[in-house]
Amino acid sequence: MDVSHILDNLNSAQREAVTAPLSPMLVLAGAGSGKTRVLVHRIAWLMTMESMSPHSVLAVTFTNKAAREMRGRIEALLGSASRGMWFGTFHSLAHRLLRAHWRDADLPENFQIIDSDDQLRLIKRIMKELQIDESKWPPRQAQGFINSAKDDGRRAGQVHDAKGGKGGHDLYLKAMTAIYQAYEAYCNRSGLLDFGELLLRSHELWLRNPELLRHYQSRFKVILVDEFQDTNTIQYAWLRVLAGQEVPLTVVGDDDQSIYGWRGARIENIQQFQQDFANSRLVRLEQNYRSTRTILDASNALIAGNSGRLGKQLWTEGEDGEPIDVYAAFNEQDEANYLAERMQGWVESGGLRQDIAVLYRSNAQSRVIEESLLRHNVPYRIYGGLRFYDRAEIKNALAYLRLVHFAHDDAALERVVNVPARGVGAKTLENIREHARQNAISLWQAIEQLVESKGVSARARKSLAEFMGIIYRLTELKSEISLSELVKQMLDESGLLDFHGAEKNDKAQARVENLEELINATKDYEPEENLTPLAAFIAQAALDAGENQAGEHEDCVQLMTLHSAKGLEFPLVFLVGLEEGLFPHSLSVEEPGRMEEERRLCYVGMTRAMKKLVLTYAESRRLYGQDQFNSVSRFIREVPVAFLQEVRIGSCLSSASDFQQSSPLAQNDTGGFSLGQRVRHQKFGEGVVISCEGQGPHSRIQVNFSEGSKWLVLSYAKLEVI
DNA sequence: AAACTCCCCCTTTTT
DNA sequence: GGGGGAGTTT
């Protein structure tokens, strides 16, 4: 059998992972070592050599995007032979299972998924009912408490056993537990599942139904997991139970790229895996195909500062490449301008803007950079704003669809009963809620009854009847017309389209376009599950926030946080804001574990760069309206000086003579200027030195000229002592 | 129901 | 500094 298309162009470690016999395997895949490739080729190999049917393959990823990419690559390799494979995120797979086995999972057939938005609203309402002071216990905190409990596999009744409930946290724990309990009860009563619940429920489904579990264990002949270092407790538990003793797990991950500990990811799962499957094979992918040797060695040196690593040394056959530039900016404006000028230089010498990425620790840093790019006419694109399904107009439209599908969806009803405003105010809504609560019925039923029994004012009754009419008419239509026609009708009848497009400005225009895009998305939508198209589309929208609908295909510079850069690569990378307090972030400094995660984050950032890496920091930065003077990030200090070159101001013109070989930390003298000294500047004329700051080539002095005082960078401004 | 004002907070983000 | 939420005014 010819398997060369599967094995060609693989290195020996990759080949080992691809062709390994069917038994548990851990693939430690360094940055840029071809991990997706290995996963895809392994599946192809198993199907070819082990005659595995696509039916027997389960592949789990973290994001829908990753799932789609992997599916696409498998199809490219195998064509239609891959049909029937189970591919998806933990959540989408759990959803699929629960839909198929809702009875065994003790769920109503029409259970609904709620997103974090709905969840938060619900928690707020419950806190009101319980009369828990929102200012004392912020609802967001309660939400976090519930979600992390679920991520750890703990139900409301179990939170006490988890952490030795002593100390001054009693009140906190008591309040949170009460909220969790009430929330859990409400969700159960109404058939609502939040994201954590999907996982917890399907884990319990395995435990409670041994036969069902056996069925899936005999069905799946292999389970592959991507980004394994990001799994949390419940995800790993789910995997382990499903795999049992029979189904071999192939897990791929990189302990050095675990950057989601703060949301429950357990890097320890990698070690746990090796303990749980003592016979597991370990393959290290250490050859890097992405970065220059300089970038790689520098990254290796940085990450070596972390303890308890599984150990991995990336290497490359590629070229040394250029040194890593370090630019010490005067302030954040200067930093941003430097980026823009450097980018212009790159483009002038024939580079593409889309090959450039700016990576920062926190979103707040993007604004100054954007302003500078706008000024310099550098087109850019920001990742990580609101995603498609998160936009208000889309959420409103979806809420109408949800009501058409299932009128007893309280969260949806609350959202749009008065959108567009039709005279159902807070008072009326409170009436409705109260009536629903007392009779243990849905808000929809409450409205029906109140309108019938004239339990509300005439005006409200008219408004509510109007609202019900919209939903009734659409409900009748839904089985007769296509999904996209239904969406069109809904946008029209509900008045949403007019409402969102009312103003005559760009924003309104964009909202209308988004709504039209929603119609588009439903046009050739084909549900996989055995659900109605409407039901399937609603579930999908909840589970997949959708790509950033940027739409522009213009050649753009990419701006994003370090977190969203994971998995991507760019020829030119700017890693900005390398200051103590910002990166590493001040909130992570005390705990060693958090600090190591910050270091991994830096490692992830550096290893995104293919050809050229530029690190920048600002000696002064305005943050929260205050100027801060932070020292250079420890991460720069941890990179051996040999890989770095400090860039002087003006060097963005990129002529070699502008570079100066030195440590960014070199302590040079300030050039012999002292306060009160008279100096002459080419442009500003004569002046008096009134203050000095900083060291080395970036030391600067403030000089009082006749036209006012100026800050001058010593190495740049040629000052003459008089 | 929109407009306005005050006050608080301020990593990272997917499902 | 500035955005968002809650509460208050018109």
Image (spheres, coloured by chain):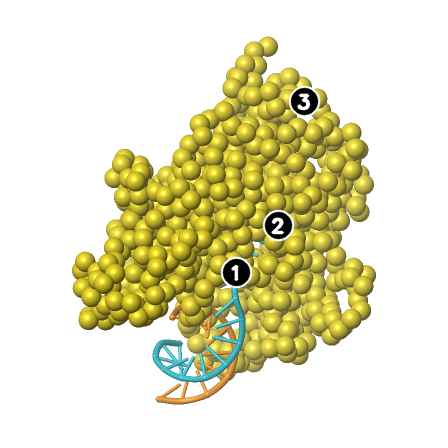
Chain colours: A yellow, B cyan, C orange
Front-most of residues A318 and A462: A318
N-term mark: 2 or 1: 1
Q: Position of residue A316 (x, y in %)?
A: 51, 28
The answer to whether marks 2 and 1 sit on the same chain is yes
- The residues bearing labels 2 and 1 have C-alpha atoms spaced at a distance of 15 Å
Q: Position of residue A1 (x, y in %)?
A: 59, 10
Q: Which residue is at 72% across, 28% downward?
A: A281
What type is the residue that disc 1 sits on?
Gly
Numbered disc 3: secondary structure? loop
What type is the residue that disc 2 sits on?
Glu
Front-most of residues A77 and A614: A614
Q: Position of residue A527 (x, y in %)?
A: 53, 41
Numbered disc 1: secondary structure? loop
Callout 3: residue from which chain?
A
Determine whether, in the image, residue A687 is placed left or right of residue A58. left
Check contact, mark 2 vs mark 1: CB within 8 A.
no
N-term mark: 1 or 3: 3
Q: Which residue is at 56% across, 18% downward?
A: A7
Numbered disc 2: secondary structure? helix
Q: Which residue is mark 2?
A: A596
Callout 1: residue from which chain?
A
Q: Which residue is mark 3?
A: A20
Q: Which residue is at 51% across, 19% downward?
A: A9
Q: Which residue is at 67% across, 22% downward?
A: A20
Q: Which residue is mark 1?
A: A581
Q: Is residue A256 above or below residue A20?
A: below
